[in-house]
Image (cartoon, rainbow, N blue to C red):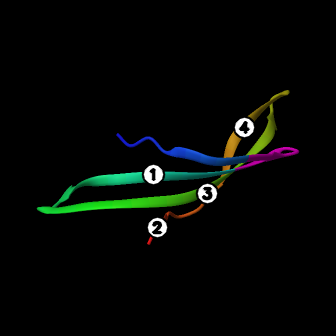
């Protein structure tokens, strides 16, 4: 299991923007690999049945660190 590291969290009104990084190491088909990835997620506080809850709104692909 890989746990992402939160780099930045910005909350503006009902929208949260979070940037994360994650380092992956392993072996695939006999080949060792190691890479660090950065990605971004957008969350929206959406009213739902007289309550509000944070829901993932958008999720963008990983960007491999060079």
Between the residue at mark 2 and the residue at mark 1, the CA separation in whole angstroms equals 10 Å
Q: Residue furthest bottom?
A: 66
Residue occupying the point 55% across, 59% down: 39
Give the mark nearest the N terminus, 2 or 3. 3
Q: Are marks 4 and 3 in contact (CB under 8 Å)?
A: no
Q: Using the image, determine if residue 1 lies above or below residue 65.
A: above
Q: Give coordinates of residue 1: x percent, y percent.
A: 34, 40
Q: Are marks 2 and 1 in contact (CB under 8 Å)?
A: no
Q: Are marks 2 and 3 in contact (CB under 8 Å)?
A: no
Q: Which residue is mark 4?
A: 54
Q: Secondary structure at mark 4?
A: strand
Mark 1 or mark 3, which has the lower sequence index?
1
Looking at this view, is 46 or 35 the one in front? 35
Q: Disc 4 and disc 3: Cα gap in Å?
A: 16 Å
Q: Earlier in the sequence, mark 2 or mark 1?
A: 1
Element under label 3?
Answer: strand
The answer to which of marks 4 and 1 sits earlier in the sequence is 1
Q: CA distance from mark 2 to mark 3?
A: 14 Å
Span colored in magenta: 10-17
Question: Splitting the image into 4 quarters, where does residue 66 fall?
Answer: bottom left
Mark linked to residue 22: 1
Q: Are marks 4 and 1 in contact (CB under 8 Å)?
A: no
How many angstroms separate mark 2 from mark 4 (CA)?
Answer: 29 Å
Pinpoint residue 9: horizontal percent, then vertical percent.
Answer: 70, 46
Q: Residue furthest top?
A: 50
Circle 2: element type: loop
Residue 40, disc: 3
Which of pointers 2 and 4 lies earlier in the amino acid sequence? Answer: 4
Marks 1/3: CA–CA distance: 12 Å
Mark 1 neighbour density, 10 Å: few (under 14) some (14–19) many (20 or more):
some
Name the residue tied to disc 2.
Answer: 65
Pointer 2 with pointer 4, Cβ within 8 A? no
């Amino acid at each position: 299991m890989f746990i992402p590291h939160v780099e930045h969290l910005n909350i503006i009104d009902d929208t949260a923007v979070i940037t994360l990084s994650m380092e992956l190491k392993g072996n695939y088909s006999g080949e060792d690999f190691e890479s660090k990835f950065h990605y971004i997620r957008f969350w929206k506080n959406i009213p739902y049945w007289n309550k509000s809850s944070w829901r993932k709104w958008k999720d963008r692909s990983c960007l491999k660190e060079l």
